[in-house]
Image (cartoon, helix red, strand yellow):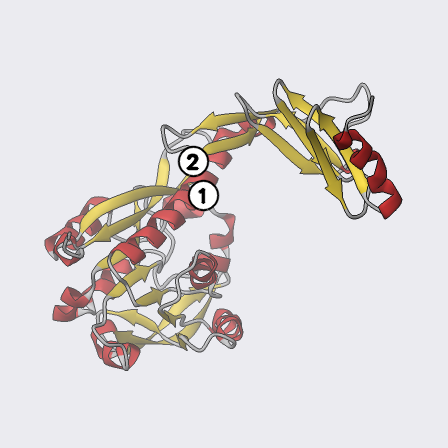
Amino acid sequence: MQTLYRRLLRLMPRLGLQVTDLGPGTAVVSRRGRRIRTPLGPGADLLVRNDGRYSVSDAGKDAWLVLRGRAPAAGSPAPEWTGVPLGDTGARLLIDRRADADERKIQLAAAEYLCSQHVTAMLELYGVNCVFDVGANTGQYARRLRRLGYTGRIVSFEPTSNAFARLRDAAAGDPDWQVHHCGLGREDTATSIHVGWKTMNSLLPPSDYGRDRYPRFATTRTEQIEIRRLDSVMDEALDGIKDPRPYLKMDTQGYDLEVFAGAGVRVADFVGLQSEVAVLRLYEGSPPMSEAVAAYEAEGFDITGMYPVTREAATGRVVEFDCVMMRAKSAPAKD
């Protein structure tokens, strides 16, 4: 004898509803579209509208990766995914095992992601409400901050004409993103910058090591630019912000310490900073990492994160780090 439950399930299709029976006492009722039950493993099933549009890969204990797209044809190799638990955080890193063929690439990609997450966390922890984006290029850093949820003011500085035009366009729809067509340095002046090196335009000439590493340094042209001191632009940048808590990001291809020096005594206003520091110098006259970090530490900043930006493929040596530093005494008091 049919139970009332079974009789109701049989009635559903007559009402235009699709029923997927998952087992005793369990069914899924949907308004439209055929649902198909795809077994994942012991005690787990996937319910999809059309199993031909999804593929499922085992990604470790009690974890599966569901990809939109047709499942591999019979006899063809399935994607090989592995799930790596990230300590006791509850997070899991999913890696296509083919990525192991280029360890350096995956390590640098992971470092970039972790650096962005760390910076976002520090901006929130220290209550940062204005980010000085020095060496903004076309606005990549600022756009990343917005994607990661930062809603405070951004003030970007880019001296080269082509990059600034794109930066201005990127910021056009963001009322709290200011852009300035100038560079920052130790003194107010006009000078020339090497351009045509994509994101690596610099006021400094390339070192012998830099020329060997990057063919783009073989040819160059220069452009006249304006340089201003950081302390001369701070009042304008922070205008209208109650209790300013600024953060200084510098990516100026070997010129970061000159930018920092231009802050003068007002460097004390910053709760944190981010600087690209060089282990292997790409530019003639740029400071080594030890000198740059020591200068920042002397002004009260402490390292909270170091993330490799570039590494040599042949030796594994790090060329540059993104160094994140915060002023510990500026951290909010614990309740």
> Do labels 1 and 2 touch, CB within 8 Å?
yes
Name the amino acid, label 2.
Answer: Glu
Where residue 185 appears, as percent x and y from the top left, is: 26, 69
The residue carrying mark 2 is 312
Q: Is residue 38 left or right of residue 278?
A: right
Q: Secondary structure at mark 2?
A: loop
Mark 2, other Cα within 10 Å: few <14 / some 14–19 / many ≥20: few
Name the N-terminal-most of marks 1 and 2: 1
When the figure is inspected, residue 210 is found, relative to residue 164, above or below; the finding is: above
- Label total for image: 2
Residue nearest the observer in this picture, 278 or 274: 274
Eye-nearest disc, 1 or 2: 2
311 left or right of 98? left
- Quarter of the image holding residue 46? top right
In the rendered view of the protein, which quadrant contains the N terminus? top right
Q: Amino acid at mark 1?
A: Arg
Q: Is residue 160 visible?
A: yes
Q: Position of residue 240 (x, y in %)?
A: 28, 81
Q: Is 110 situated left or right of 303 in this image?
A: right
- The residue under label 1 is 213
Residue drawn at (82%, 32%) of the image: 7
Please tell me in which quadrant of the rendered image residue 13 appears. Answer: top right
**Cα separation between marks 1 and 2:** 9 Å
Q: Residue furthest right?
A: 14
Check disc 1: other Cα within 10 Å, few if <14, some if 14-19, many if 20+: few
